[in-house]
Image (tube, grey):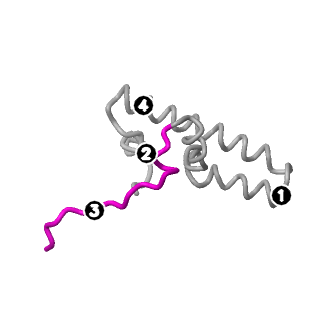
Amino acid sequence: MNQTPGVYPKLTPELRDRSLMGMLKLFGPGAIGSGETVFASRGGAIFGYSLFWCFLVGSLLKGLQVYSGCRFITLTGRHPLQSWMELPGPRG
C-alpha cells in the first residue's frame, strides 16, 4: 500500500475569505438541515403556497424530534431506538 500522506488542493480565494460577508456567500441549504427539509423549496416551486402548511408542520415536527432525541440521549445515555426494543411486539 502507498504510505504517502494525501495532499489537499489549495483553497480558492472565496473559501479563504473569513469575513462575515465571505462566509454568508457560502451559507447554503446544508446549513438548514437534511435533504427532506431543503426539498421544500422544490415543492414550493412546483405547487406554490398550497403545500406551505405541510412543509411548515414537517419542519416543526422534525425540530421537535431532534430536540427530544438529543434530550433523551443526554439524560439517559441510551439511544432512543434502544428503548423501542422494550416495547411489546415483533422485533426488527
**Mark 4 or mark 1: whose residue is earlier in sequence:** 1
Marks 3 and 2 close (CB-CB < 8 Å): no
- Local packing at callout 4 (Cα closer than 10 Å; few below 14, some 14-19, many 20+) is some
The answer for how far apart the CA atoms under marks 1 and 3 are is: 46 Å
Q: Position of residue 12 (x, y in %)?
A: 47, 55
Q: Is residue 62 left or right of residue 53?
A: left
- Give the number of the disc on residue 32: none
Q: Quadrant of the N terminus?
A: bottom left
Q: Given the image, on which type of amino acid does mark 4 rest? A: Phe
Image coordinates of residue 25 in percent, x first then y, are 60, 46
For label 3, the residue is 7
Q: Secondary structure at mark 2?
A: loop
* Disc 3, SS: loop
In this rendering, the label closer to the viewer, 4 or 1 = 1
Counting other residues with Cα less than 10 Å from the Cα at mark 3, is it few (<14), some (14-19), or many (20 or more)?
few
Given the image, on which type of amino acid does mark 2 rest? Pro
- In the drawing, what numbered circle is on residue 88? 2
- Left or right for 50, reference 30: right
Magenta stretch: give its range.
1-18
Find disc 4 in the rendering and name its residue. 72
Mark nearer the N terminus (1 vs 2):
1
| Magenta-colored stretch includes residue 7 | yes
Query: Which numbered disc flags the more N-terminal residue, 2 or 4?
Result: 4
The residue carrying mark 1 is 47
Which of the two discs, 2 and 4, sits closer to the camera? 4
